[in-house]
Image (spheres, rainbow, N blue to C red):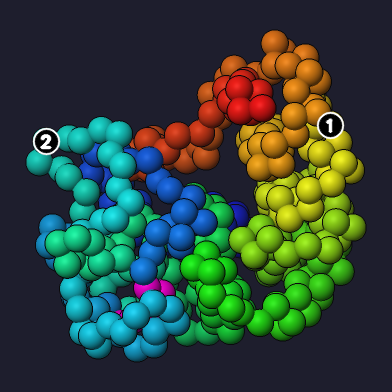
Amino acid sequence: MQKQMRYFQWTFLGILLMITAATQVQATTWDEPWMDAVIREADYFVLADVISVDEHKGAKIHIRQQFGGGNLPEDLEITNFYFLEMTSNSAGHGPEFHLPDSSECYFFLKKNKKGEYCIPTPTTGFAYRDSGDVFATYRHSYHQTKISVDIFEMTMQAIFNKAHRLKFDEAPIRAWIDEQLAKKPAGFEDGEINDFFMQHVALETIFHLRLTGYEKQVLPFFQDSNNRHNRISAARAMIANDSEETKELLLEKIGSKEEDDFTKVICIWTLRVFKPKELKNRLKKLAPEASEEYTGFGGNIMDPRVGTHFPSVKQALEQLIADL
């Protein structure tokens, strides 16, 4: 039972209130953005106390610490969303604010043209802090993690700075990543879950910061047959190494009959960044047999994030080929 609960935390932990939001919005759904886009579009990165929440009007917060962006007033109201792409809208049930009341949260905020302070969507752009831990997103709000405050602040500060072309200190981050990736790939089993969270953050941080030099350390995670989340994060981390070897590894995974479709799409997206024109003919040979089945994050069909777009392997391959 304990293992199942921890696994539940990994897949749907977030702000627990997402389930509440899902039941409230009914057929109101949106295309949930990935975390790199959330951070890139944000103007501010802060830690704040949530003073009060009105599901229709927004939330009042008190800024405790500011990690990025221009100066903000200590007290402000979040009243809108800056990255909300609706996919369906039920009359009388628009997007609502379901932030955890009377709590500490890290926020990625943006000030829109009307002067309103916004979070990206009702279900992302914030991370709940509970004592010494943070329930955070490094990949997508469907795939959340639990990490210590000090590691969260160290990595996320650097990720925000990188996204906004600001300086950050690589040395302590690399030292921490080296320590995590020196361990064998962890899973969801009791005693391994904390290592899994740490390794997840390490791999995703490589992706966000485009840290080079981790080819050998990433490979065991890319080849981990026991945990697809390790393979997904490793495929994303490979974006920092544009080499012939990396391209061949990605191509092999895309053409594998054993690999799951979600991981294949991530491999295709990483390969797409490299613009591998020399592989165009080989990719064309893979396309006719590629899966056309819907793939995505899964989860509760009442979750408003079901509008999130995720292509089939065939769609992703055809897009890559068209780009070359």
Depicted 115 relative to depicted 7: above or below: below
- The stretch drawn in magenta includes residue 46: yes
Q: Residue at x 39, y 84 (%)?
A: 66
How many numbered markers are drawn?
2
Q: Residue at x 75, y 23 (%)?
A: 280
- Cα–Cα gap, marks 2 and 1: 47 Å
Q: Which residue is labeled 2 in the image?
A: 91
Identified by mark 2, the residue type is Ala
Q: How busy is the neighbourhood of tag 2: few (under 14 within 10 Å), some, or many (20 plus)? A: few
Image quadrant in which the N terminus is located: bottom right
Q: Residue 211's image quarter?
A: bottom right
The answer to whether one can see residue 148 in this image is no
Name the spot of residue 153 as percent of width and height, x first: 54, 80
Q: Residue at x 17, y 67 (%)?
A: 115
Q: Residue 252: give its label.
A: 1
- In what element is the residue under mark 2? loop
> Which residue reaches farthest top?
288
Name the spot of residue 205 as percent of width and height, x first: 65, 65
User: Where does the magenta region start and end?
Assistant: 44-49
Depicted 112 relative to depicted 59: above or below: above
Q: Residue at x 51, y 33 (%)?
A: 310
- The stretch drawn in magenta includes residue 111: no
Q: Residue 204's image quarter?
A: bottom right
Dominant SS type (magenta)? strand
Q: Nearer the viewer, residue 232 or 13?
A: 232
Name the spot of residue 171 as percent of width and height, x first: 74, 82
Q: Would residue 87 appear left or right of 254 to someone viewing this image?
A: left
